[in-house]
Image: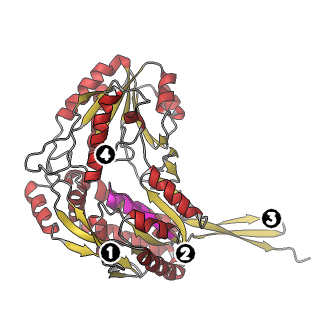
């Protein structure tokens, strides 16, 4: 499908009709316990798009009990049954790819071209991928002279899943697909800032889902999170979001001693060596800066550039950012949209003020952007900071906006110490033509995913997860099923004497 401004504006108008979504519990849409709602807004216009229920502990309890009731039957379903469900869900997503993309754009502020070409196909792809894995949940046998041991692998149980607002559909798919493939039942808590696409998606697949297998409770994380994660019937937690929130969730989960997987923040290093393809590296840095407005946990927000090529790199980097089309997110020509919320806009603006205070220089951009016709929108200029030291807050803390710091380096060993000198370790990049150097440096980097000579080179089945305070556990891959299953060892005595 070719995106045109006429098509996108028509879709934006059609999908902007304000409606109210309830909670999805036991196969039905129900109201919240107290009727309080939360408005979902368009960050480019500040217009209200929809309302969701503000969930409570009572709503959470209903959802968890529904999931627990559905567990015995779903956990014993066959691999073909689970595969068929996941394939059907993937097909539903593709049937409404354009609509879901537009809902992501309207509610999150991301360019429609990004949502249509990346987010929604990626969400469908997760269900495709994990549809096949339903057949790969294997047990094991161990044979001894007098004993046979049968190791069964079973669904872990009811799982609580909490997803962020930056890529709602993709995050929902990355959580739901492996849990369903493993035979778990689910209570999903989407972000109250941006979840329009997720609520519509659940509405569209409700007829495919056995009652209680997938439940959705909307609302504020501060209200819903604790009763969900600490519920005695929940057996596992999957969370993607910020480190401070993760610390709270880990504490809640400790009450019942249940496992968690945590995909948290990043401050990823993108290293440019003196033998790099400078034009390609600069394009990569520009893409990393603006993709999804920089609201990406794996963004290469620290670019380490060898001093021999720094001037050349900065010229190419700035040239590419100068050509970026920032504007109305529903316009297919737009490459940089609006921050997802006022809170995020204010956070990024604070870092733009902090950088010069710390001694950094705004080499490009550095302030709020004015977009014609959208004066109320939360727009930020794409920004390059230079003269950055690795100990500055702008180099240590996750900004989650279109802001990149450039750090000069000369000595490889010293540079790698700086690369690893943050509390995060989620992703990274390296640009060099020297294969030996590439192997040596990637082994030294303390991070979970490293792209060599092409940043954001996503492929199906690549384990995704972090080192250090970027979290633990791996998603988007076959190993994810280990987090949603448990083993049971049956030891059979063969000695009749």
Splitting the image into 4 quarters, where does residue 488 fall? bottom right
- Earlier sequence position, callout 1 versus callout 4: 1
**Residue 55 rendering spot, x and y as whole percentages:** 37, 72
- Earlier sequence position, callout 3 versus callout 2: 3
Q: CA distance from mark 4 to mark 3?
A: 61 Å
Report crowding for label 3: few under 14, some 14 to 19, many 20 or more residues within 10 A (C-alpha).
few
Residue 205 is labelled as: 1
- Specify the segment rendered in magenta: 159-177
Q: CA distance from mark 1 to mark 3?
A: 48 Å
Q: Are marks 4 and 3 in contact (CB under 8 Å)?
A: no
Tell us which disc is closer to us: 3 or 2.
2
Residue 267 is labelled as: none
Q: Which residue is mark 4?
A: 347
- Earlier sequence position, callout 4 versus callout 3: 3
Q: Is residue 469 magenta?
A: no
Q: Which residue is mark 3?
A: 144
**Residue 370 rendering spot, x and y as whole percentages:** 13, 42
Tell us which disc is closer to us: 4 or 2.
4
Specify the color scheme: secondary structure
Residue 367 as seen in the image, left or right of residue 460: left
SS for dot 2: loop
Q: Nearer the viewer, residue 35 or 78?
A: 35
Q: Are marks 1 and 4 in contact (CB under 8 Å)?
A: no
Q: CA distance from mark 2 to mark 1?
A: 25 Å
Whether residue 482 is visible here, answered yes or no, is: no
Q: Residue at x 33, y 71 (%)?
A: 54
Q: CA distance from mark 3 to mark 2?
A: 37 Å
Q: Which residue is mark 2?
A: 233
Q: Are marks 3 and 2 in contact (CB under 8 Å)?
A: no
- Earlier sequence position, callout 2 versus callout 1: 1
> In the figure, 97 relative to 280: above or below?
below
């Amino acid at each position: 499908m070719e995106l045109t401004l006429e098509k996108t504006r028509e879709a934006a108008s059609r999908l902007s009709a304000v409606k109210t979504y309830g909670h999805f519990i036991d196969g039905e849409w129900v109201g919240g316990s107290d009727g309080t709602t939360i408005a979902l807004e368009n960050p480019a216009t500040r217009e209200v798009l929809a309302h969701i229920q503000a969930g409570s502990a009572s709503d959470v309890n209903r959802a968890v009990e529904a999931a627990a009731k559905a567990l015995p039957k779903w956990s014993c379903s066959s691999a073909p049954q689970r595969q068929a469900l996941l394939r059907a869900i993937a097909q539903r997503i593709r049937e409404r790819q354009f609509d879901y993309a537009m809902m992501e754009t309207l509610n999150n502020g991301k360019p429609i071209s990004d949502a249509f070409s990346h987010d929604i196909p990626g969400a469908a792809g997760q269900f495709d991928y994990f549809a096949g894995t339903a057949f790969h949940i294997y047990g094991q046998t161990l044979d001894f002279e007098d004993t046979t041991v049968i190791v069964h692998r079973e669904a872990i149980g009811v799982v609580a899943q909490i997803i962020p607002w930056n890529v709602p559909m993709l995050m929902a798919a990355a959580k739901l697909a492996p849990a369903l493939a493993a035979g778990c039942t689910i209570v999903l808590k989407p972000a109250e800032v941006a979840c329009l696409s997720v609520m519509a998606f659940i509405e569209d697949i409700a007829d495919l889902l056995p009652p209680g297998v997938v439940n959705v409770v909307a609302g504020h994380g501060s209200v819903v999170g604790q009763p969900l994660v600490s519920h005695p019937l929940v057996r596992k937690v999957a969370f993607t979001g910020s480190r401070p929130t993760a610390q709270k969730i880990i504490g809640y989960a400790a009450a019942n001693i249940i496992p968690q997987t945590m995909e948290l923040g990043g401050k990823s290093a993108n290293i440019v060596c003196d033998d790099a393809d400078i034009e390609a590296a600069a394009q990569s840095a520009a893409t990393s800066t603006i993709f999804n407005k920089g609201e990406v946990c794996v963004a290469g927000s620290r670019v380490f550039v060898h001093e021999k090529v720094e001037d050349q790199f900065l010229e190419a980097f700035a040239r590419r950012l100068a050509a970026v089309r920032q504007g109305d997110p529903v316009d297919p020509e737009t490459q940089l949209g609006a921050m997802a919320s006022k809170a995020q806009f204010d956070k990024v603006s604070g870092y733009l003020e902090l950088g010069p205070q710390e001694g950094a220089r705004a080499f490009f951009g550095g302030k709020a952007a004015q977009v014609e016709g959208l004066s109320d929108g939360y727009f930020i200029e794409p920004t390059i900071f230079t003269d950055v030291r690795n100990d500055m807050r702008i180099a240590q803390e996750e900004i989650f906006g279109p802001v990149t710091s450039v750090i000069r380096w000369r000595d490889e060993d010293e540079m790698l110490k700086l690369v690893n000198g943050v509390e995060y370790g989620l992703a990274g990049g390296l640009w060099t033509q020297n294969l030996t150097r590439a192997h040596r440096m990637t082994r030294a980097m303390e991070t979970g995913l490293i792209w060599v000579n092409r940043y954001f080179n996503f492929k199906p089945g690549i384990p995704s997860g972090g080192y250090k305070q970027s979290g633990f556990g791996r998603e988007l891959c076959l190993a994810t099923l280990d987090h949603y299953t448990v083993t049971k060892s049956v030891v059979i005595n063969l000695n009749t004497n």
